[in-house]
Amino acid sequence: MNLEPSPGASNSQDLAMNTQSKDVQACLKVVREALLDVKAKEIVELDISRISNVADAIVIANGTSTRHVKSLADNVAEEARKAGFRPIGVEGERDAEWILVDLGFVVVHLMLPTARKFYDLESLWRATPESVA
């Protein structure tokens, strides 16, 4: 009995991973441009594909006020829709101190500087499985 995968099986898996990687990069580009259009501050992109199955990347950015954070979220969601990336959900719009825009491959966190400093998502998501031991 032969239990080795057929050569065609691994090629189709590699192709799917390549396609997903291109989708992630395209989505990140749309998000980056949408944030820059509305003058987001301190934009950080983190690749979390190796430590999470929730998303492949996280983008974190600051707004200068709740109104600015709201406009950042609105612009990200609108530009993502235009590019064919339908937002799965948007949370936190009411208070607008921290708004999360879930685009599937990419999760965008838009925050006031005080909330960003308090929650320190960069430290949380930069933790590797080896350092969590």
Image (spheres, grey):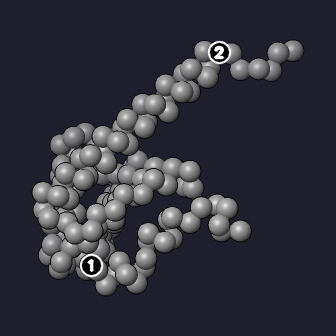
Q: Is residue 4 above or below residue 113?
A: above
Give me the residue at 61% from left, 23% from top. Answer: 10
Question: Can you give x and y, in whole percent of width and height, for residue 109 in the image?
Answer: 33, 66
Is 96 or 112 nearer to us in this picture? Answer: 112
Query: Mark 1 sits on what residue?
Result: 112
The reply to whether residue 39 is visible in this rendering is yes
The reply to whether residue 100 is visible in this rendering is no
The amino acid type found where label 2 is placed reads Pro
Is 36 or 94 nearer to us in this picture? Answer: 36
Q: Is residue 51 above or below residue 15?
A: below
Question: Can you give x and y, in whole percent of width and height, for residue 9 in the image?
Answer: 62, 20
Instruction: Please state, as top left, top right, bottom left or bottom right, where the C terminus lies in the image.
Output: bottom right
Label 2: element kind: helix
Q: Is residue 43 above or below residue 3?
A: below
Question: Can you give x and y, in whole percent of width and height, for residue 96 in the image?
Answer: 24, 76
Q: Is residue 6 above or below residue 49?
A: above
The amino acid type found where label 1 is placed reads Leu
Query: Mark 2 sits on what residue?
Result: 7
Give me the residue at 44% from left, 69% from top. Answer: 122
Label 1: element kind: loop
Give me the residue at 57% from left, 55% from top. Answer: 51
Count residues near mark 2 (Cα–Cα under 10 Å), then give few for <14, some for 14-19, many for 20+. few
The answer to which of marks 1 and 2 sits earlier in the sequence is: 2
Real-space CA distance between mark 1 and mark 2, rounded to the nearest whole angstrom: 50 Å
